[in-house]
Image (cartoon, coloured by chain):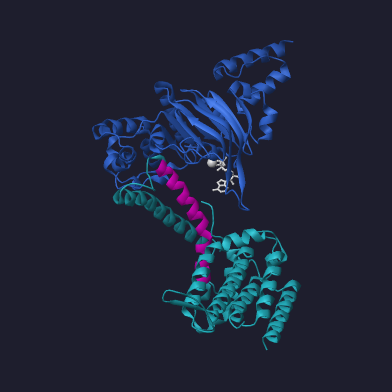
Chain colours: A blue, B cyan
Amino acid sequence: MDISFNRVSYIYQQGTPFEHRALKDISFSLNKGEWLAIVGHTGSGKSTLLQHLNGLRQPTEGEVKVGDFHLSKKNRPKDMKQLRKHVGVVFQYPEHQLFEETVQKDLLFGPKNFGIDESEFETRVHNALAAVGLHEDVLERSPFELSGGQKRRVAIAGVLVTDPQILVLDEPTAGLDPMGQKEIMDMFYHLHQTKGRTTVSVTHDMEMAFTYADRIIVLENGQKLIEGTPHELTQQETLLQQAKLDLPERISFVNKWNQRNSSQLDETMPISELAQKISQELKEIKDQ
Amino acid sequence: MTPSFLIGQYISTGSVIHRLDPRIKLVMVFIFVFIVFFANHLYSYVLFSTFVIVVALATKIRLSYILKGIMPVGIFLLFTFFLHVVMTNEGQALLTIGPLTIYTGGVIRGIEISVRLFLLVFFTSLLTLTTPPMAITDGLEKLLSPLKKVGVPVHEFALMVSITLRFIPTLMEETDKISKAQASRGVDFRSGSLKSRAYAVVSLLIPLFISSFRRADDLALAMEARGYRGGEGRTNIRALILQKRDYVAMILYGLMILLFIFVQS
Ligand SMILES: Nc1ncnc2c1ncn2[C@@H]1O[C@H](COP(=O)(O)OP(=O)(O)OP(=O)(O)O)[C@@H](O)[C@H]1O
Ligand SMILES: [Mg+2]
């Protein structure tokens, strides 16, 4: 399913003194199978934007299209459930949504709501658990007696179990240790690569956006400041600073290196190759 | 979730009314509630209305917004009005509809009661619009502190109220978040059979309970870690000290009441 935003604005609490324009005239489109990262400082409107993707919010102005579903101020799709079945959302701290007695029951919550055939339950649960790297032993345990990391995985499995076409991730790794963060993001990346899942992810972490995304949108104060591939963004350091964002360490290093030594290193090459090139250039400088 | 019901909602504009001591405002509202029911002269109503409108203007909050906020009470006012119109049998008969006869006395009493209630609600909503809930609690605690001598747990009560007030927005935010998460997993809170809706509510309530317990635990720990030992000998970070403006407000208020007594007699 393709996604497109056409001049979308969103206003919180319209018509009160608390009125707040959280999105301003946002347009972009995303093809099936792409990974889009949305980055921005806190309060820039990232979560608000995401919530339009499965109809949790309707635009105040403009139109959102997700596949055949059209959302605008007036237009709310009748089969909202179908939309939500196709768009899986992993929220920040998803473990807060766990509520059932056993992990198995919690995983089946989504499939039951969406009316998925019961004969599929077993394979779906099996696949979802395998995807997040949990053993089937947890199925009969209470989700509340698991560790923090396990809870997070169960909650993510609870979204994957409906096998959504589009995955929407709102900082799914917040509060995890670096190792756990990488494992979870790698897992989403694997789904994206092998099953061609369209993915929209929100993050503060530029490193993460640069590692996984095909395209990046930078939000500032509800406005789209930059849109481009990671490579294109490397040339936009000043604009990024305006949005209170830094380029990943490695890229800003390469940028500075290129500037100072007027060389042409490419930041997309593997880190070992980069190291070799740099030591080579260092030697040349010494020889001169 | 737009708050159509404004009562209890604080709007900061930094006006003089906002900066008045909460104790003064509480006492004023309390007295007002009391004296409004003694008003029975046209000029008294004019006096009170003028007073309330002047105060409302001084808050710098848009008048239309204040009125919109107390609109829900309007239904209650209408109901009281009709009740009085129908139930009172004084004065001349105005018209008869079936078994009901409407008298002039009824209409007058209806209008009187409605105006009193309206003034009351309006003035009280000015208190909550211009005073943060925490300040109201602090003010109440100070005003009621003499009761401590006879063993009333005023401090504990005030603490309970402020914790509750503090966590209402947090809980609402939490509810919003969890209901969004469950809606994304296909829950429909609006339609479906009674059983499926009950289940939908359970999927919302259990996470809410769990997070409330967690928060309560965290709060208790944080308070203990910072040496909280109950109200004994505890001082207040926002010490309430009467300023010049508070005395001026008291004098003006006193003059208003004198004028009222003069008009009535
Ligand atoms: N329910 C609400 N009512 C009013 N304003 C809101 C509401 N929710 C969010 N906002 C405001 O909208 C703006 C965007 O919020 P949003 O949650 O989309 O930010 P974000 O980019 O996701 O931030 P973060 O990185 O902190 O999660 C913020 O300024 C916020 O204060
Ligand atoms: Mg957010």
- Which one is nearer the viewer's eye here, A282 or B82? B82
Q: Where A269 sits versus B36, above or below?
A: above
Determine whether, in the image, residue B65 is placed left or right of residue B2: right
Query: Magenta span covers which residues?
Result: B156-183
- Ligand 1's image quarter is top right
Determine whether, in the image, residue B162 is placed left or right of residue B252: left
SS majority, magenta: helix
Q: Kindly identify the residue that appears in the image at 68 percent across and 20 percent down.
A: A257
Q: Is residue B9 visible?
A: no
- In the rendered image, residue A54, in percent from the top left (x then y), is placed at 45, 36
Q: Is residue A187 visible?
A: yes
Q: Kindly identify the residue that appears in the image at 66 percent across and 70 percent down.
A: B239
- Hey, which quadrant is residue B261 in on the image? bottom right
- Hey, which quadrant is residue A5 in on the image? top right
Say if the magenta span includes residue B171: yes
- In the rendered image, residue B76, in percent from the top left (x then y), is placed at 50, 68
Q: Where A97 sits versus B148, above or below?
A: above
Q: Where A217 sits versus B18, above or below?
A: above
Q: How many callouts does the rendering have?
A: 0
Q: Kindly identify the residue that appears in the image at 58 percent across and 23 percent down.
A: A230
- Which one is nearer the viewer's eye here, A166 or B206? A166
Say if the magenta span includes residue B162: yes
- In the rendered image, residue A75, in percent from the top left (x then y), is placed at 49, 38
